[in-house]
């Protein structure tokens, strides 16, 4: 999987999501659904109503060719449907946890990524040139609004707003390998 790892505050995340919408992309949140139909978001207002969910599929009419697949689990005697990653689309995965920031004043790591292949009805499908170009554009956007740092061999990008919030003492970064990230930036 091609992947760019980052630490985003909610504000960094919303800046990126708004950029996606400005590029005419849509976002499908990975919610627990009541049926096998998912919702598609096309504006920041719609997106904010779905907070604080952490995983989204980003699509565009130029590369999203197949509906996403859902499966269900029984939770509290009720069917809950969930999106299966890599099934349909294809899409760009975006994971950005917000619960730590909302509940514990901690900003944790997330990622944006694409797979080398996806599936539709058991058939392998490969990311198009257009999907790869969108992914490249999105990673460039993230890098232009973040600062890099490394822990071991892994590189992360830290959103500028996340840095400011942590330097002011409003939040802390989730520690990785016992490193205090604010001192690495």
Image (tube, rainbow, N blue to C red):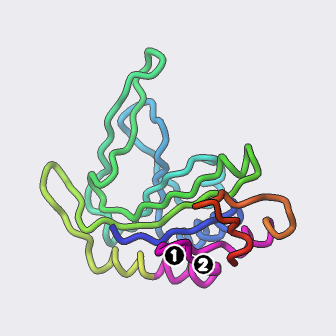
Looking at the image, residue 23 sits to the left or right of residue 49; the answer is left
Dot 1 lies on which element?
Answer: strand
Q: Check if residue 43 falls in the magenta segment.
A: no
Say which residue appears at 64% left-offset and 81% top-offset. 147
- Is residue 46 among the parts visible in the rendering? no
Q: Which residue is mark 2?
A: 149
Name the spot of residue 59 as percent of width and height, x first. Answer: 40, 64
State which quadrant residue 90 falls in.
Answer: bottom left
The image's mark for residue 155 is 1
Q: Are there few (<14), some (14-19), or many (20+) residues within 10 Å of tag 1? A: few
State which quadrant residue 169 falls in.
Answer: bottom right
Given residues 24 and 100, the one toward you in this image is: 100
Q: Check if residue 149 falls in the magenta segment.
A: yes
Given residues 5 and 84, the one toward you in this image is: 5
Say which residue appears at 64% left-offset and 52% top-offset. 98
Name the spot of residue 128 as percent of width and height, x first. Answer: 26, 75
- Is residue 19 among the parts visible in the rendering? yes
Of labels 1 and 2, earlier in sequence is 2
Inter-mark Cα distance, 1 to 2: 6 Å
Tell me which segment is drawn in magenta.
137-165
Dot 2 lies on which element?
Answer: strand
The image's mark for residue 11 is none
Q: Quadrant of the C terminus?
A: bottom right
Say which residue appears at 32% left-offset and 50% top-offset. 68
Looking at the image, residue 135 sits to the left or right of residue 101; the answer is left
Q: Is residue 6 depicted above or below 74 in this figure? A: below
- Give the farthest residue toward the front: 178
Say which residue appears at 58% left-offset and 73% top-offset. 19
């Amino acid at each position: 999987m091609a992947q760019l790892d980052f630490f985003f505050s909610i504000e960094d995340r919303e800046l990126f999501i708004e950029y996606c919408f400005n590029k005419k992309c849509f976002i499908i949140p990975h919610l627990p659904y009541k049926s096998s139909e998912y919702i598609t978001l096309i504006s920041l207002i719609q997106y904010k109503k779905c907070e604080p969910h952490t995983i989204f599929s980003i699509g565009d009419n130029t590369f999203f060719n197949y509906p996403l697949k859902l499966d269900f689990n029984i939770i509290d005697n009720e069917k809950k449907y969930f999106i299966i990653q890599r099934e349909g689309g294809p899409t760009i995965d975006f994971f950005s946890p917000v619960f730590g920031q909302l509940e514990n004043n901690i900003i944790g790591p997330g990622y944006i990524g694409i797979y080398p292949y996806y599936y539709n009805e058991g058939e392998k499908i490969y990311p198009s040139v257009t999907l790869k170009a969108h992914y490249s554009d999105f990673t460039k956007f993230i890098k232009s609004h973040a600062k890099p740092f490394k822990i071991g061999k892994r590189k992360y990008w830290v959103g500028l707003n996340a840095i400011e919030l942590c330097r002011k003492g409003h939040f802390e970064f989730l520690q990785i390998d016992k490193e205090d990230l604010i001192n690495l930036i």
